[in-house]
Image (spheres, grey):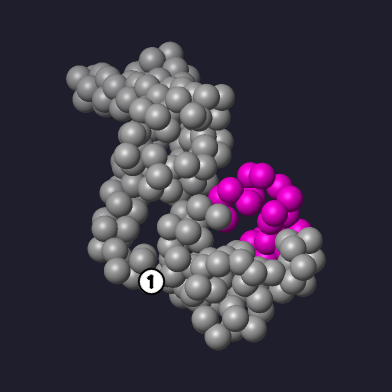
Amino acid sequence: MACFTFVKLMMVLFNLLIFLGGLTLLAVGIWVSVDGSSFLRILGPFSGQGMQFVNVGFFCIAIGAVLVLLGLLGCCGAHKESKCLLLTFFSIILFIFITEVAAAVVALAYSSFAEGILRAWATPALKKDYGSEPVVTKIWNTTMTQMKCCGFTNYTDFVGSKFEKENGGSLPPICCWTNSTPCSSEEAERSAVQGCFKHILEILKEHANIVGGIAAGIGVLEIAAMIVSMYLYCHLDNRVS
């Protein structure tokens, strides 16, 4: 009985932290999305280091909403001793965990396959939306400027694109070492600026230990949450009896 009460209390406190963290992310995401200029002014000199695109707020909103939902399910399930809520909490954590493991396996063992999936999303966006959709344009401009890369694979992602046609055959300036307009396909080919995907892979390899440690830590927390929720779920009948 004492062990059950202790685990229940830990479950409530753990999910309360998740809930508060989710609310914080949600609030920051809404603030950045609604009033991004004020947010960037607060950052001061750091505002130019990749944070000038405020659409990161939508990502914070999505993650925050998921964390709030998980926190509510976990807290209510443990406090009310509801097997339904506990099982729902366990199922969501298990789904997230399996998705993360699958993504890691694909990224590690089938990097070319992962690259193909990302290219299927990124290349059409560059060809159709870059230069016309403010969100896509701002994100890619920020990424290419900060990482000093061109396109997803390389400059060929912009060849035949809507941006090239509307700018008389000129590509984004970052695709040429001269970093000036017009940036022709021939000049971009001679410049051989690396694609952003390869650049990201190099950064991940350089920081593999940090990335792996963070991923392992998240995985341990998820496993612990599943064990605790399943323990409470299985021992509720004994507590009632």
Q: Quadrant of the C terminus?
A: top left
Q: Is residue 9 left or right of residue 71?
A: left
Observer able to see residue 175: yes
- The residue identified by callout 1 is 202
Q: Is residue 195 left or right of residue 146?
A: right
Give the residues drawn in magenta, as a range: 119-140
Is residue 121 rendered magenta in the image? yes
Q: What residue is at 59 percent from the left and 78 percent from the top? A: 188
Amino acid type, label 1: Glu
Q: Is residue 96 left or right of residue 18?
A: right
Q: Quadrant of the N terminus?
A: top left
Q: Nearer the viewer, residue 136 or 191?
A: 191
Provide the major secondary structure of the magenta segment.
helix
Badge 1 crowding class, 10 Å Cα cut-off, few under 14, some 14 to 19, many 20 or more, is few
Q: What residue is at 35 percent from the left and 33 percent from the top? A: 43
Is residue 78 rendered magenta in the image? no
Q: Residue 13 placed where, x, y %? A: 29, 22
Q: Nearer the viewer, residue 109 or 75?
A: 109
Q: Place residue 238 in its image quadrant.
A: top left
Q: What residue is at 43 percent from the left and 28 percent from the top? A: 39
Q: Is residue 213 above or below residue 51?
A: below
Q: Nearer the viewer, residue 170 or 20?
A: 170
